Amino acid sequence: MTTKFKLRSQFDYLLDQINLLCEELKTHEVVDSFYYELPAITAEDEKKAPEYIQVTKLSGEKAFNKCLSSYLDLFVGDKKSSKILTRHPGLISVNDFQGKLKARIREVNKSKEDFKNLILQINSNDARFDAVHNAIPNLITLAAYRNIHCEDQIPYSVRFTWMKKHSTRTLSKKLALEMLSKSSGYSNPRVIDQQNWLQIVESEKRRVSSLNENSKLRIKRPTRVTPEVNIRFSAKNRYHVSAALPFILLNPQKETKIGTLPDYSAKNIDVRKKDYSYLVERIYLENLPKD
């Protein structure tokens, strides 16, 4: 059996399962629906740390239909790039007393995992890309991988928040010093003059030079932020999952507190001050502890 045929067959099964889930959701009693619409992004936006993200809240039937269509948002379409991954935070509260929806969600996620594993059997990234897009043109592979999360117990609360993502690079002391030396030739509009800028860079180099030769360094630069869902049963019993796709709360109860996704502002989440102590804050350089 050819790789192309295997990929196409597995993807067709995955798509069938998602469509069945959407149809079954329409036949069940939907108690509430919310969808948090985010601004359109470009491929370049995926690499940046945004300063502000405005959220538009939808509810009722309009939100329900947006949630359903988001489960099927697997292709490039109007995005113009397979690197653009649209996030669809939302919530569907629906009664599922016989457990049919839960079983369907489990099968959807299993078919996603099987599809992912089939792709990962291909040796290299380039070969994977060619194989997938030959079998399923215009597919956004990462979108096909995303799980649909649900909960059928009675949580104390279901709330939405923003989570920071980072791009990470590990480097040696030597490479860090080379990077800082190159910085000496740059101009920086935040300092008064070039002489002050050189003094700043030299101070950074001295801090790095004082480290042991075998020191492991890391640049952990904040990039995009993503929405997530926090599900809480008690102070110690809680978990969070990605809100890239709408969360499904099965058999909802009135006592569960439901939150909303707020607008994101970088001013309200200063990851550097809260979570990290940087050796060179300007480039997010930190000294990793010894094993």
Image (cartoon, rainbow, N blue to C red):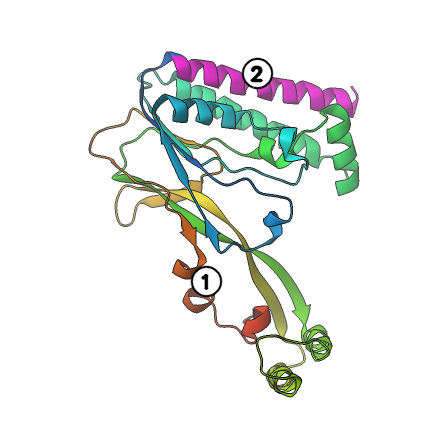
Which circle's residue, 2 or 1, is located before the other in the chain?
2
Badges 2 and 1: C-beta atoms under 8 Å apart? Answer: no
Q: Nearer the viewer, residue 19 or 289?
A: 19
Percent x, y for residue 124? Answer: 77, 41
Closer to viewer: mark 2 or mark 1: 1
Answer few, some or many: residues within 10 Å of disc 2's Cα (few below 14, many 20 plus, some between 14 and 19): some
12 part of magenta stretch: yes
Percent x, y for residue 213? Answer: 67, 80
Residue occupying the far top of the picture: 27
Classify 239 as above or below 3. Answer: below
| Residue type, label 1 | Val
| Residue type, label 2 | Asp
Q: Which residues are magenta?
A: 1-26
* Badge 1 element: helix
Classify 287 as above or below 66. Answer: below
Which residue lies under the disc numbered 1?
A: 271
* Placement of the N terminus among the 4 image quadrants: top right
Q: Quadrant of residue 230?
A: top left
Our reading of the magenta stretch's main secondary structure is helix
Residue occupying the far left of the picture: 255
Residue 286 seen from this side? no
Q: Nearer the viewer, residue 143 or 231?
A: 143
Percent x, y for residue 155? Answer: 28, 36
Which residue lies under the disc numbered 2?
A: 16
| Circle number at residue 205 | none
Percent x, y for residue 169? Answer: 64, 62
Residue 36 seen from this side? yes
